[in-house]
Image (cartoon, helix red, strand yellow):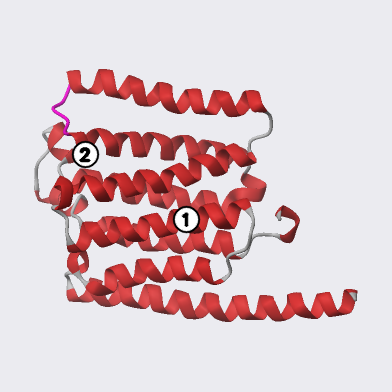
Amino acid sequence: MCYIKYMENKKLNILKIISTIICAVLAFGALVFVLLKGDIKYHILTIISVGICFLFSLLFLRLTAKTILLTTALAANTLAMAFAIFDPTILNGLLDTSLLLAMEACFVVYTLWIIKGVGMRIISLAVRVGLCMLAYFVLPNYAALTTKDILTIFLMINQVVTIAILALNFKREWLTLLGVIVLFVSTLFAWLASGGIDIFGTTGQFIEFLFRQDWEYIFRVPALFVIALSSVWIKNKQN
């Protein structure tokens, strides 16, 4: 019985390795192609590369908290990117931002799952709410923020808290941590490129290059692929 189980796991791991290589080639190949063409923001291959990361995670979906939450997060991100690329004006851009918040909600639930103790879970939620409320009441006094700006700031605040919690569980969550860090960088570039940089009153050709819209997708695809890897290659002892 143990030998049969060992052989089944070995075959599954071989399938995972092959699938990882194929999905990496497809996702990053599509990304490189649109980068060379220079129209990454509105190209169909951009959303395809994002969708491949979701499908990769979905292919090995199991009934565990981690795989379900991370795969759901990837699905929400895929929808958000689809609206952002193909219909950026829908609801004044608030729909894609709301979907990204739904993605982050999955990470919030996941951090609550890995935190031990009810008290620490309550504290983590209190920190998230407290920081968001502080930003909501303080930042408008120093800059003219739109509703999308505020929602994006809420998103980034929660991403930072998620990063901190994952860092405290680095030994088990290092791959997820890496993906969320790169995802935060993508979110930051997206916000700055969509008008956030104007708040600081900074101009210049270097600034325009640094905060161009392309960087969002350049960082987002690797981030999503790493998060998908974290879901696919979850250790059996975590199930």
Q: Is residue 123 above or below residue 75?
A: above
Mark 1: amino acid: Thr
12 w.r.t. 129: above or below: below
For the residues labelled 1 and 2, say whether their Cβ atoms are less than 8 Å apart: no
Between residues 202 and 228, which one lies in front from this camera angle? 228
The part of the image, by quadrant, that contains residue 159 is top left
Residue at 53% across, 41% down: 109
* Residue 62 on image: x %, y %: 62, 63
* Side of 202 where 21 appears, left or right: right
Residue at label 1?
72
Given residues 149 and 178, the one toward you in this image is 149
Residue identified by numbered label 2: 148
Secondary structure of residue under mark 1 = helix
Q: Quadrant of the C terminus?
A: bottom right
Magenta-drawn segment: 142-146
Q: Which residue is pictured at 53% across the width and 28% down the height?
A: 124
